[in-house]
Image: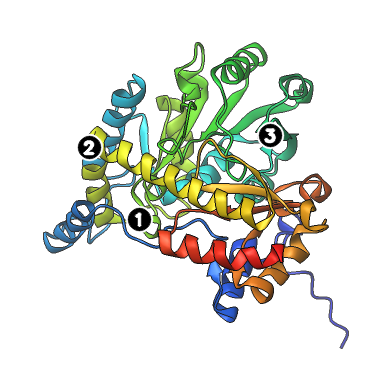
């Protein structure tokens, strides 16, 4: 009998296979290489936060299903965090939603807010889940590319304005920006806000690296700009700020109507998650300023440690203003294909990195760019830099 079986994967997800992070992390394990590809720390966060999770487990808090919007203690802490750092006031009962990490928050927001055919403008290169989530929601992805200039990646505001059409529904903004490390300036954010108001656009902002900015950069939430609070869905995450990425605790803050829409989609994804960890993150968000300042100082030092090593190895380095990633260019080695370079790097040097080309709609735009993470122990970064220097010999 002739088979008439159809492909198992629907058209919206055609082209989305195993993520580059899974592929490169598996390569690191197989070759015993240092993994500077996937962005997770190799040490745990504050001991008092970990103990808060243990205490919640022992006290029986969160061991069963927590409330759908998140435990009240965490929602109150998130609202207090937004007020403390940005002067933004949110009702913890109606304007805060806890999610299974920022990835679920992005998925739920796009599924809730997009109609099939709606256009979504995203800053390219972008985190790979953006493309998949837009596709699952039936939207059309419209990239606006950040391009290297004067040692950093910059947004062309004229290109952004030109990308908006009558079909544009939503802007998907990420700052501090993964993978480039760019932090959008007040001027750039003002222009984005004015465009959103003028064209009546919704905005989803991925701010998971909000406490990781360096030098003279500062994180300014788009929701705080004129006209933006009631059209912006702000997404945060505990994983990047407190170095407990495996706990998968994220959140959404927005006006009540937007949060209600996102919650409608979210409840059919995980419904709830991370019960005991929610109580621990509620305590973490109330840590004193000294923790956040120290965390940022430590990561800036690690940035400089790895950046100096990459320059010594021969890479062109784009100095990141935020996140814990460094984007480099491999053309000084006479190389042009970052994907081939990263696949060969473990055998050549015992180090794993990520090719930025996977974060572009047009792979040629990032063909020679490679991303490294510096959220690792100093001895690991030193050893990685030592291994990479073999490239220069």
Q: Residue 59 location in percent, x, y?
A: 11, 59
The residue sitting at the front extreme is: 393
Whole-angstrom CA distance, mark 1 to mark 2, is: 16 Å
Q: How many marks?
A: 3
Q: In what element is the residue under mark 3?
A: strand
Whole-angstrom CA distance, mark 3 to mark 1, is: 30 Å
Residue at screen point 25% across, 33% down:
289
Q: Nearer the viewer, residue 130 or 262?
A: 130
| Contact (Cβ within 8 Å) of mark 3 with mark 1 | no
Q: Which residue is mark 2?
A: 286
Circle on res. 284 = none
Q: Residue 218 location in percent, x, y?
A: 46, 26
Tell me the crowding category of disc 3: few under 14, some 14 to 19, or many 20 or more residues within 10 angstroms, Cα based.
many
Is any part of residue 287 visible from this angle?
A: yes
> On screen, 26 above or below 317?
below
Q: Residue 337 location in percent, x, y?
A: 81, 59
Tell me the crowding category of disc 1: few under 14, some 14 to 19, or many 20 or more residues within 10 angstroms, Cα based.
many
Say which of marks 3 and 1 sits in front: 1
Q: Which residue is mark 3?
A: 120
Left or right: where 305 falls relative to 145: left
Tell me which numbered mark, 1 or 2, is placed earlier along the sequence: 1
Q: Quadrant of the N terminus?
A: bottom right
Tell me which numbered mark, 3 or 1, is placed earlier along the sequence: 3
Q: Which residue is mark 1?
A: 244
Q: In what element is the residue under mark 1?
A: loop
The residue sitting at the left extreme is: 59
The residue sitting at the right extreme is: 2
Tell me which numbered mark, 2 or 3, is placed earlier along the sequence: 3
Is any part of residue 352 visible from this angle?
A: no
The residue sitting at the bottom extreme is: 1
Left or right: where 315 falls relative to 3: left
């Amino acid at each position: 009998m002739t088979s008439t079986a159809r492909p198992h994967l629907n058209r919206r997800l055609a082209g989305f296979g195993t993520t580059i992070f899974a592929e490169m992390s598996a390569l690191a394990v197989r070759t015993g290489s240092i993994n500077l590809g996937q962005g997770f720390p190799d040490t745990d966060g504050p001991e008092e936060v970990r103990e808060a999770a243990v205490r919640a487990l022992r006290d029986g808090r969160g061991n069963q299903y927590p409330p759908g919007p998140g435990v009240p203690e965490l929602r109150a802490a998130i609202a207090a965090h937004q007020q403390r750092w940005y002067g933004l006031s949110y009702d913890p009962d109606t304007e805060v939603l806890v999610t299974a990490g920022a990835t679920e928050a992005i998925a739920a927001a796009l599924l809730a807010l997009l109609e099939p055919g709606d256009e979504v403008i995203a800053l390219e290169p972008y985190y790979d889940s953006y493309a998949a989530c837009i596709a699952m929601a039936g939207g059309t992805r419209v990239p606006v590319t950040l391009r290297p200039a004067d040692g950093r990646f910059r947004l062309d505001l004229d290109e952004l304005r030109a990308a908006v059409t009558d079909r544009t529904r939503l802007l998907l903004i990420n700052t501090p920006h993964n993978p480039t490390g760019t932090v959008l300036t007040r001027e750039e954010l003002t222009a984005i806000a004015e465009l959103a108001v003028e064209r009546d656009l919704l905005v989803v902002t991925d701010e998971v690296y909000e406490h990781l900015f360096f030098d003279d950069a500062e994180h300014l939430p788009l929701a705080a700009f004129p006209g933006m609070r009631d059209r912006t869905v702000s997404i945060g995450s505990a994983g990047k700020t407190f170095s407990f990425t495996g706990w998968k605790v994220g959140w959404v803050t927005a006006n009540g109507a937007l949060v209600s829409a996102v919650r409608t989609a979210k409840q059919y994804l995980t419904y709830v998650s991370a019960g005991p960890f929610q109580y621990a993150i509620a305590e973490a968000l109330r840590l004193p300023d000294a923790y956040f300042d120290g965390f940022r100082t430590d990561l800036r030092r690690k940035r400089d440690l790895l950046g100096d090593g990459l320059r010594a190895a021969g890479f062109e380095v784009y100095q990141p203003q935020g996140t814990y990633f460094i984007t480099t260019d491999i053309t000084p080695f006479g190389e042009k294909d970052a994907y081939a370079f990263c696949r060969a790097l473990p055998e050549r040097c015992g180090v794993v990195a990520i090719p930025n080309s996977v974060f572009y709609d047009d792979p040629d735009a990032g063909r020679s760019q490679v991303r490294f993470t510096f959220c690792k122990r100093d001895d690991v970064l030193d050893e990685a830099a030592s291994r990479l220097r073999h490239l220069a010999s």
